[in-house]
Amino acid sequence: MNIIACYNIKGGVGKTASAVNLAHLASQQGARTLLWDLDPQGASSFYFRARAEASNADISLLRRQKSIANHIEPTQYDNLSLLAADRSDRNMEMLLDSSKRPERKLSSILQGVMDHYDFIFLDCPPNISLLSESVFHSSDTLLIPTIPTTLSLRTLGQIISYKKENPKMFPRLMTFFSMVDRRKTMHKLIVDRPPALDTQILGSHIP
């Protein structure tokens, strides 16, 4: 079982599109797949016609009041299940802050369903927080969509630096270029000759 977190500090880089499409692709290839929408904005949930409501579902998970299985719903696609966004996720930081070993919370929550899925994709909010740190600890791979621009590369460099400062916290980092427009000189230059970075840059990119 693999846990893949689609993450970036920067918003608007294609995290949600990546999480949704990778989850769908995995499910269509026969893999039992779960997509957990951790972003209170609920964009992944919207793709699957699920609304982000203030149900306190994720809060109850953190408090271990309910099993994660109680909140997972099937989607219209075979082999693909969804744990929809919860607007009360905005309060998760306060609860994590008062928890023992908050960085281990997501791992603990996911233990109950790990045997039921081949892949779990996490659609993460764009920040560095206690929730992010818990995502880092629970994931096998941190997948970072990056627009081929100077500002996005700077943000990627910040994530890499944060990993170097906290090596035990982070899983494997992988990045790919998203929202690529080869008509733009900067996009073409960066995609064709990516800078040397302390992370794996995948050969595939997304327009």
Image (cartoon, rainbow, N blue to C red):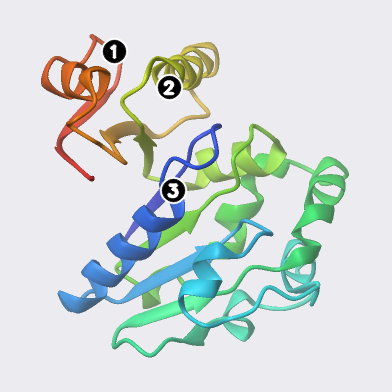
Identity of the amino acid at label 1? Leu
Q: Quadrant of the N terminus?
A: bottom left
Task: Find residue 128 and report its image quarter.
Answer: top right
Q: Which mark is residue 51?
A: none
Q: Real-space Cα distance between discs 1 and 3?
A: 20 Å
Query: Which x, y percent locates residue 139?
Result: 44, 46
Q: Real-space Cα distance between discs 3 and 2?
A: 13 Å
Please name the residue shown 51% across and 16% down the image: 158
Please name the residue shown 59% across and 40% down the image: 126
Q: Are marks 1 and 3 in contact (CB under 8 Å)?
A: no
Query: Which x, y percent locates residue 22?
Result: 29, 60
Q: Is residue 112 visible?
A: no
Of callouts 1 and 2, which one flags the residue occurring earlier in the amino acid sequence? 2
Please name the residue shown 26% across and 18% down the image: 186
Q: Is residue 150 left or right of residue 37?
A: left
- Closest to the observer: 119 or 150? 150
Q: Is residue 181 visible?
A: yes
On screen, residue 86 above or below 125: below
Q: Which mark is residue 197?
A: 1
Q: Which residue has dot 3 on it?
A: 15
Of callouts 1 and 3, which one flags the residue occurring earlier in the amino acid sequence? 3
Task: Find residue 118 and report its image quarter.
Answer: bottom left
The kind of secondary structure element at disc 1 is loop
Please name the residue shown 71% across and 68% down the image: 86
